[in-house]
Amino acid sequence: MSKLKIAVIIGSTRDARFAPIPAQWIFKLAQQREDLSVELVDVKTFDLPFFNEKMSNAWAPSEDARAVAWQKKIGEFDGYIVVTAEYNRSITASLKNAFDQAYVEWSRKPIAFLGYGGLGAACAIEHAHSISIELQMVPVKTSVNIGGGEYLRTVHQREPIAGIEQVLLPSAKKMLDELVWWGSATKTARESQASKT
């Protein structure tokens, strides 16, 4: 099977955001694999409006050109790694909006999460799992969580991620393995279904 095309999505859009730093780290780690082709996708560059379509694109085409551009980009991939902060026990508003702006393009593909926050974004990732299931995605079990002391060192004290890498690598490697397994399974299923239509 050809390489799986995976997007590393930066889910925060604040000017002072930390997200690009762990996104670059997981991007470089995923690039080392021979079974993945990886691309960074930054929600901020799409300037998405808050969802204001008549309905989901599962039922009718979107009208806003920015939403359509986002859908086209998301549709290029076989799976996703989403980098998210945790705000008040959930994901960022910009990330939730990005999920809502597409449906067809997310469906039947795996998604993994790297989160950061006091509790390693555990609550945000749990919420994101529910959202992704509603979008007919396959959230992988393992996530990468930057929390506690590692969170303080990297986010507040701006220590390079290399300083906490040994803590993150076991879960990151397991997460990528799960993403590849589910990515291969869902890609095969989608291709099989497409050949029958």
Image: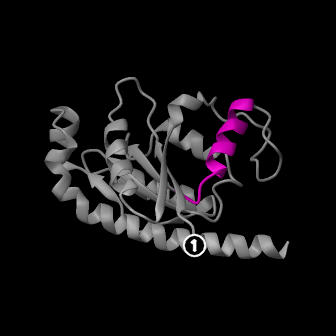
Residue at which label 1 appears:
1
Q: Nearer the viewer, residue 158 or 59?
A: 158
Instruction: Give coordinates of residue 154: x percent, y percent.
Output: 20, 39
Q: In the rendered view, does 118 fall on the left or right side of 63?
A: left
Q: Residue at x 46, y 66 (%)?
A: 35
Instruction: Give coordinates of residue 176: x percent, y percent.
Output: 39, 64
- What's the magenta region? 65-79
Q: Nearer the viewer, residue 150 or 161?
A: 161
The image quadrant that residue 158 belongs to is top left
* Residue 61 appears in view: yes
Magenta residue check for 69: yes
Three-letter code for the amino acid on which mark 1 is drawn: Met
Instruction: Give coordinates of residue 45: x percent, y percent.
Output: 54, 29
Q: Residue at x 14, y 46 (%)?
A: 163
Instruction: Give coordinates of residue 61: x percent, y percent.
Output: 82, 44
Q: In the rendered view, does 24 fall on the left or right side of 74?
A: left
Q: How many marks?
A: 1
Q: Is residue 28 above or below residue 98?
A: below
